[in-house]
Image (tube, helix red, strand yellow):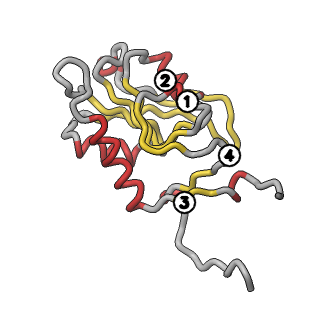
Amino acid sequence: MTDRLPHEKGFHISWDQIHRDSRALAWRLDGQGPGDGTWKAVVAVTRGGMAPAMIVARELDIRTVDTISVKSYDNQTQAEAVVLKAPEASLMGDGTGILVVDDLVDSGKTLELIRGMYPKAHFATVYAKPKGKPQVDSYITEVSQDTWIFFPWDMALQYVEPYRK
């Protein structure tokens, strides 16, 4: 067996798949908000969480949507997580009734940082890796820690040489 680079053990996600999986996440979250089961707002973790958050907000008829911008990667290299833009403070409070949505939890560092800011928020991702799972309250699909997920917004359609030529 040969050692693989992160991009060589890839899990390619299509637009159709991210839409189906994000809708499945919404169905899992429906009626799970505090009190009467509704959510006060959705906060997307930019940039990857924006598409899933939009789909979840639509499916659950949540009209208040904000973002939190956290930088934790330089291309495919993880770095120290830093908040670049926080959501509106009057909306967030301690996070009660807030649904924080991201595409993926990898190491969990990004969500750990956000959870420290909003400890009572509900954290939901479409995909989860084992190291990050403790930071997530809800997710749809688990993938191995050594898998690199290729999201549709990171790819372009182009010709690919056949495996065997």
Check the picture and name the quadrant holding the C terminus: bottom right
Spatial CA span between label 3 and label 1? 22 Å
Q: Give the numbered dot on residue 110.
A: 1
Q: Is mark 4 on a helix, strand or loop?
A: loop
Spatial CA span between label 1 and label 2? 6 Å
Residue 62 image-quadrant placement: top left
Mark 3 or 1 closer to N-term?
3
Proximity of marks 1 and 2: CB atoms separated by less than 8 Å: yes
Q: Quick one: which residue is furthest to the front in this view?
A: 1
Residue shown at the point (54%, 23%) measured from the top left: 112
- Residue wearing tag 2: 114
Q: Where is residue 22 in the image (x, y as percent from the top left)?
A: 36, 47
- Residue wearing tag 3: 12
Image side of residue 2 versus residue 87, left or right: right
Q: Quick one: which residue is furthest to the bottom in this view?
A: 165
Q: Which amino acid does label 4 sit on?
A: Asp
Mark 1 or 4 closer to N-term?
1
Crowd rating for badge 4 (residues with CA inside 10 Å; few <14, some 14–19, many 20+): some
Q: Where is residue 24 in the image (x, y as percent from the top left)?
A: 33, 46
Spatial CA span between label 3 and label 4? 14 Å
Position of 41 relative to 28 (above/below): above
Mark 3 or 2 closer to N-term?
3
Crowd rating for badge 2 (residues with CA inside 10 Å; few <14, some 14–19, many 20+): many
Residue shown at the point (68%, 38%) measured from the top left: 78
Camera-near label (3 vs 1) is 3
Q: Is mark 3 on a helix, strand or loop?
A: strand
Mark 2 or 4 closer to N-term?
2
Check the picture and name the quadrant holding the N terminus: bottom right
Residue shown at the point (24%, 45%) measured from the top left: 58
